[in-house]
Amino acid sequence: MIRYYYIRLRFLVVKNTMVKYKCPECDVDVDVPDDALDGEIVSCPDCGEEFEVNIRKNKKIELKKMITEREDWGE
Amino acid sequence: MLYDYIRPEERMLIDSSRRKGIKLILHKSEDFFCDALELFDRQEFQNVVLQRSISYFRSLHLTALLENRGITVINSSDIASMCGNKLITTLVLAREKIAAPKTYIAFNVDSALKLLSRIGYPAIIKPIIGSWGRLVAPLKDPESARAILEDRANMFPMYQIYYIQEMVQRPPRDIRCFVIGNEVIAAIYRYSVPDEWRTNTARGGKVENCEITSELEDLSLRTAKAFGDGIFGVDLMESPDGLLVNEINYTTEFKNSVSATGIDIPGLILDYALGRMKN
């Protein structure tokens, strides 16, 4: 949720252009900034699910369900 | 900058670099491959690399490869290997006479139970490698301890190094102190939320600005210096006997701390990296 609000805030400040993608979980529109990077995390405003922006070779964007934790992940 | 995901922290670093006019080149760790001794294209990397990988093992090995080619990585593989392993961290802290929770080690279930009967309950078990409070468990009595230890006996061998600590009598919060180079730049209290004893923000812990007292500053700087020149999130506990250093984070997260403290942590990280580049 914090990530979502941060991302929303960033969009308000930086005024990125948004591209709408369908949430793979609940089919609601998910805004992805046009300067999103491969590996960027976006959240669905409806179900709260987090997705990784996956930029394929043909520049097509896919939203991949985010793996939230692995054994050696952390800070 | 090396990354696995663009989390809010990495996004803040990217945005900050744009504001500062710094050309930040991004490398996704997963995409990397090379000869072990020769990077295929040395020019791809600048002289200084900010390591923001989320995976400890990938980060450690990739950092070692880059360092072997003369690249300065922040934080270094030495720092990552010391801070990433709780037992090594404990040994470094002890060597520098830095106050820390009492720590014990055992290597199988029976030895761990004998140890616990000697030191008494409750205690805490932690994986030697891990973060975000993952698999950190209270050992409240012999029955629950046996169950938890036996679970670990069926996991990857790393989990059979039973790293056990005293349960420090602390308020329901701890302190995260941010050290960059020779400076303490910010500190936060991390409060555990209801039904959760761990204070990790990844577990929903709430944050609040913490005043940097001279005791906190001295202890955090001494701790950081024990590990090297770098960027650290030093975790401390307020025990009845004073501050204890609990853990040291070497790819510290800071998304909640920027709003709580008002300190431009990503900007200061980039300034520090630029300084290392000039040196």
Image (cartoon, helix red, strand yellow):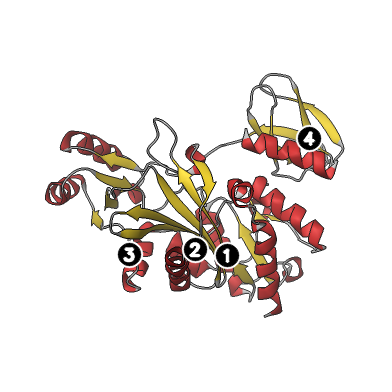
Nearest-to-viewer mark from 1 and 2: 2
* Residue shown at the point (64%, 22%) measured from the top left: A47
The answer to whether tags 1 and 4 share a subunit is no
The answer to whether tags 3 and 1 share a subunit is yes
Question: Mark 1 sits on what residue?
Answer: B63
Q: Amino acid at mark 2?
A: Ala
Q: CA distance from mark 1 to mark 4?
A: 31 Å
* Residue shown at the point (13%, 48%) measured from the top left: B114
Question: Mark 2 sits on what residue?
Answer: B80
Chain letter for mark 2, please: B
Look at the numbered discs 1 and 2 and tell me whether their residues touch, using CB distance below 8 Å.
Answer: yes
Left or right relative to B233: residue A36: right
- The answer to whether residue B255 is visible is yes
Which quadrant of the rendered structure holds the N terminus of chain B? Answer: bottom right
Of mark 1 and mark 2, the one earlier in the sequence is 1
Of mark 3 and mark 1, the one earlier in the sequence is 1
Mark 3 crowd level (few <14, some 14–19, many ≥20, 10 Å Cα): some
Question: Mark 4 sits on what residue?
Answer: A32
Residue B157 pos. (x, y %): 33, 49
Q: Which mark is residue A66?
A: none
Of mark 2 and mark 3, the one earlier in the sequence is 2
Q: Amino acid at mark 3?
A: Ala
